[in-house]
Image (cartoon, rainbow, N blue to C red):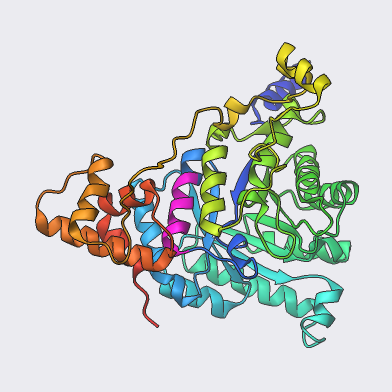
Amino acid sequence: MKKRNARQMKSRSKARNVIKIIDVTNRDGVQTSRLGLSKLEKTMLNIYLNEMGIYQSEFGFPVTRHETNYLNANLELAKKGVLRPIVLSGWVRAITKDVNVATKLTKVEHLNLSISTSEQMLYGKFRGKLSKDDIIEMMTDAVDLARKKGIKTIGVNAEDASRSDMNFLIKFAHKAKAHGADRIRYCDTLGYDDPFTIYKRVRLLASEIDLPIELHCHNDLGMAVAVSIAGAKAAIDSGVDAYINTTLNGMGERAGNADLASVVLAIKYSSGFGDRYALDERIKLSYAWKIAKFASYAFRIPIPVNQVAVGANAFAHESGIHADGALKDRRNYELYDYEELGRGEPEIIETGRMITAGEYSGIKGFRNVYERLEIKFKNDKEATNILELVRHANVHTQKPLTHDELRFIAKYPDVAKKIFTMSP
């Protein structure tokens, strides 16, 4: 009886497994063909993601030299407490060369190391030059070096995991764990999995290795959100934490990735989840509207009218039956409230005279812009310095700066200067 009670107490004391969000807009989202973000826009996204309570931002490529100043500037913001508690992680290939370069060029403390694991990639990408043993050796050497270099969190990515042999995937993950990896990223790189296959595969993988599982799912078959939460369910059911990779507005290569707002809503409101699975309690869904609109502006891609949660028609009713039902009780035709997403406030649009700050602004127009933001400068020298930074920022973004961008530059001019500086 005493033993049984002890086991029950131990079970009760064990923390409940949680689903956390790792947003990869600043890594995978910016790889969208023909699109991109300026370093200032990437920084603003990190700030918004932090405010929203997102656990981690995969904020860039530490081996890509045009990212160096931006990455180190954002890490500086983390030390200042501006980007905290969000974790800033970099993405590199699982090779020692990348780990060396990443830790030499930047002060990054969290890395995801990625390498392909499928037969298709071994022969179609590596052209048969690498064996499965070579893949494992390269990965473990990279993990060993990352740990030696002082990297605090190491995630190991199995690219094309959904098309990988399951026995090899388990062996690969076991080796990663043995060498000190903190998480395994199961990559559905081509959107090949469906909710049923990924549940089965991740359940087996998580049960075998007993490590937290990241789900990185693409939308080639239109199932990225469904597959992501099915994979997370499998991880939680196996007794480990789950991390879902998302992007804002589903941006990403080809057909995109799992949309951030959609994933959070699916976990909170779909019939199979609800209170059964714990979502990171720091997440504030009320930021969804603001961050989606900024991402749309930054990427220059309009939000589709029928986009989940943030589309113009997400809460629009025209059919007589629907309109009547929604007016009687919103739950008749609305699964969740628009206020929860930060929607509902009227938006004021300037239709009269407008003075903007840009790359050709003069001091008087510039001062007018900042006066409207209720920001005052100590003296003319400070105003001139900030104006110069605003000009550089506009060269980067090639669009009018938002009020938050203008405020950021005025508040952190030294960090902003680093973000705008590149050394070819």
| Main secondary structure along the magenta-highlighted residues | helix
Figure quadrant of the N terminus: top right
Is 208 rendered above or below residue 8?
Answer: below
Q: Residue at x 53, y 44 (%)?
A: 291
List x then y, in percent, for residue 217. 74, 55
Against 345, residue 115 (above or below) is: below
How many badges with numbers are in the image? 0
Depth check, front residue: 314 or 337? 314
The reply to whether residue 55 is in sight is no
68 relative to 115 in the view: left or right: left
Q: Is residue 58 magenta?
A: no
49 relative to 138 in the view: left or right: left
> Nearest the camera: 351 or 32?
351
Span highlighted in magenta in the image: 38-48
In this view, 91 is above or below 2: below
Query: Which image quarter: residue 8?
Result: top right
